[in-house]
Amino acid sequence: MTRVLHILDHSLPLHSGYTFRTRAILKSLEASGIEVAGVTGQRHAAGGADSGEVAEEVEGLTFYRTPGTPSGPPVAREMREVAALRRRIEEVARDWRPDVIHAHSPALCGMAGLKAARALGLPFVYEIRAFWEDAAVGNGTGTQGSAKYRLTRALENRVVKRADAVFTICEGLRGDLVARGQDAGKIAISPNGVDLSLFGDPPPRDEALASELGMGEGPVIGFIGSFYDYEGLDDLIAAMPALREKHPSASLLLVGGGPMEEALRAQAQASPAENAIRFTGRVPHSEVERYYSLIDVLAYPRKKSRLTDLVTPLKPLEAMAQRRIVAASDVGGHRELIEDGVTGLLFPPDDPAAMAASLARFIDARAGWDAMRDAGRAHVADKHDWARNVSRYRDVYAKLLQAQGQGR
């Protein structure tokens, strides 16, 4: 049986889009007959997990931890992280004996995995979920074109060039790598996906929660997630007064938190639609489904940027898997997931007035929503079901192992 060791920035029990994708990949590979384990870098503990664990089993998956805490001046700190993670990978590999090393972005994990794989004589796969230099710009922790931005990009280029095979989560990322001169023949796509067995029909509206929050009958426009600037929630709030001119009972429900929360709350308080906008703060993961049940249209108003044009988000897919109605800004990452008028609505980005007009027309046409729900679910089942997508990994692993055997 093939064994694949996955190299990760962080993992369960931490909750993030990154850890949920990892869980889906590992569980799907296991179900297909491949043995898996993970090794996390020092940033896993820095993210709030227990740094004292040498190995941890979470939801039936085994993760080996790298001891220590990132420290030192920039560049030197990152190189120490890479060295520590490489040592840990080689330690685990000597005992667990994997057949393939599969590292997931960021490039620090990629470089550690690459060095370890070469030392161990194993095939190396690198998977890019986003360009982290662009993600840093999007969440306000980096600047495009800065020294750190250029260094991160250069390190990623180096890992991709030396990897035996590369995966990206979408065509936008793959196309960008090819434009940089990388070998298109070794770059495959493993799109964001969902485990359809986890998603059935949405539950009925939670009337007790609606009453507690003071939500009317709607229509309710909603967002559930992290409040980063690139998500465009300020544009959604700005669109509400115009939307309520056409649909006076429309309201907005914002579930979650993040760097923009204080500014968004202040904006909402100053809005003529203040009484129709509700913030819940962060809610326990086990309670999220109750909030989803109140929302008629899940909105994803991302601003147009390199990040949002190149990267496909997971949440719209999860929503469509549950037969929920989605509306999103017309940026590259959304266009890869949503067919306008068929599986959801695409509206102009960075334009609250156009957003309000699009949403108003969309609500007027709600007689067609049932067909849209079915189309969205069918699209996810056809293109984004992990039970099917896992074959992309299996095929690449098999080719690499065959090539390795022929080379001996």
Image (spheres, rainbow, N blue to C red):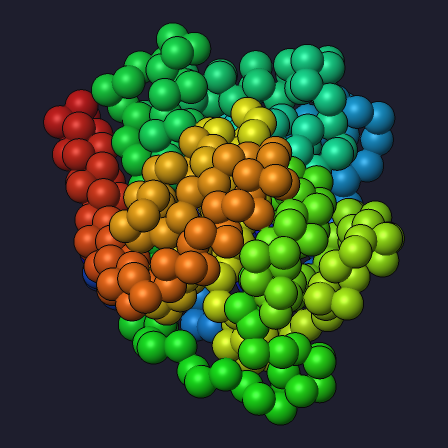
Q: Pick the residue in front: 43 or 228.
A: 228
Splitting the image into 4 quarters, where does residue 294 fall? bottom right
Left or right: 267 as drawn, with respect to 374:
right
Tell me the quarter of the image containing the C terminus: top left
Q: Pick the residue in front: 198 or 239.
A: 239
Left or right: 302 as drawn, with respect to 118:
right
Q: Compared to 81, does 96 lie above or below?
A: below
x 61%, y 40%: residue: 353
Percent coordinates x, y for residue 96 in the rendering = 40, 54
Q: Residue furthest front?
A: 245
Percent coordinates x, y for residue 232 in the rendering = 64, 42
Total numbered labels:
0
Left or right: 32 as drawn, with respect to 93:
left
Q: Compared to 29, does 391 lie above or below?
A: above
x 71%, y 66%: residue: 276
x 76%, y 33%: residue: 141
Q: Pick the residue in front: 403 or 298.
A: 298
x 73%, y 22%: residue: 143
Percent coordinates x, y for residue 342 in the rendering = 28, 50
Residue 392 in view (yes/no): yes
Q: Compared to 122, does 247 lie above or below?
A: below
Q: Residue furthest bottom?
A: 208
Residue 102 in view (yes/no): no
Percent coordinates x, y for residue 182 in the rendering = 37, 13
Tell me the quarter of the image containing the N terminus: bottom left
